[in-house]
Image (spheres, rainbow, N blue to C red):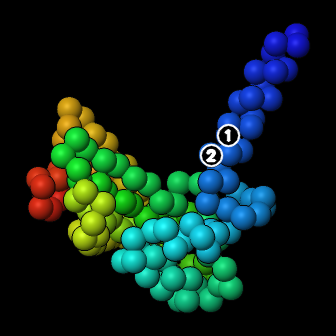
């Protein structure tokens, strides 16, 4: 019984650390504030998009849920960064979301430099994966009842069908 309690406590701590990696306060309703220090560590183009969203949303702080920022790297030094604005606190929800879904943006960098935006769309969800060294993005835009899932593959320069 003691072992079960210990394992449950360790699991809870691990989940709490992961969920609060960006936050300076305990999440309320799943929201936590993105720390200024963490925001400053992000690439400038990514940070600018986050601050622009904060402004159009009319928020005093950057509130996010776990999974707002996702990363994917391959063995050649390419890194994809995805922003999921459905996980971004916004009083003016229509600034980030439409009937087709919420804004999602993907940025790329090679060897951690020269981040640039390579994709943006209002969709239901995007999932990134790295299968056998090939990075890809699965797009699900089925919020309006029309199915339009597609796979985009990173070819070293851009995402292509």
| Residue depicted at 74% across the width and 37% down the height | 13
Residue 148 % position (x, y)? 27, 56
Q: Residue at x 88, y 10 (%)?
A: 1
Q: Position of residue 26 (x, y in %)?
A: 78, 58
Query: In this rendering, would 137 be left or right of 62?
Result: left
Closer-to-camera residue (150/142):
150
Residue 148 shows up from this direction: no
- Kindly tell me whether residue 69 is visible in this rendering: yes
Residue 86: mark in rendering: none
- Toward which corner of the image does residue 54 lie, by quadrant? bottom right
- The quarter of the rendered structure image containing the C terminus is bottom left
Q: Which mark is residue 18?
A: 2
At numbered mark 2, what does the secondary structure look like: helix, strand or loop?
Answer: helix
Q: Which residue is pictured at 62% across the width and 89% down the height?
A: 58
In the rendered image, the vertical position of residue 136 relative to residue 141, given as above or below:
above
Q: Which residue is depicted at the point 62% across and 74% down? A: 36
The percent position of residue 155, horizontal first and vertical second, equals 11, 53
Mark 2–mark 1 CB contact (< 8 Å): yes
What is the CA distance from the residue labelled 2 to the residue labelled 1? 5 Å
**Does 5 sit left or right of 33 as displayed?**
right
Q: Quadrant of residue 45?
A: bottom left
- Dot 1 falls on a residue whose secondary structure is helix
- Which image quadrant is residue 27 in? bottom right
Give the left or right position of residue 104, taking residue 1 as reference.
left
Q: Nearer the viewer, residue 141 or 136?
A: 136
In the depicted structure, whether residue 3 falls above or below residue 8: above
Q: Which residue is mark 1?
A: 15
Density class for disc 1 (Cα within 10 Å; few <14, some 14-19, many ≥20) is few
Q: What is the x, y in percent for residue 42?
A: 45, 68
Name the residue nearer the viewer: 108 or 120. Answer: 108
């Amino acid at each position: 019984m003691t072992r079960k309690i210990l394992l449950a406590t360790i699991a809870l701590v691990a989940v709490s650390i992961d969920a609060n990696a960006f936050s300076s306060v305990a999440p309320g309703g799943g929201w936590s504030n993105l720390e200024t220090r963490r925001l400053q560590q992000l690439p400038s183009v990514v940070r600018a998009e986050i601050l622009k969203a904060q402004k159009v949303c009319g928020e005093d702080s950057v509130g996010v849920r776990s999974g707002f920022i996702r990363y994917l790297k391959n063995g050649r030094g390419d890194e994809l960064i995805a922003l999921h604005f459905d996980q971004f606190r916004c009083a003016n929800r229509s600034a980030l979301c439409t009937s087709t879904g919420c804004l999602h943006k993907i940025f790329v960098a090679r060897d951690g430099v020269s981040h640039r935006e390579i994709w943006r769309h209002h969709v239901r969800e995007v999932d990134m994966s790295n299968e056998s060294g090939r990075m890809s993005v699965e797009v699900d835009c089925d919020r309006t009842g029309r199915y339009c899932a597609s796979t985009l593959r990173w070819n070293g320069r851009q995402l292509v069908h």
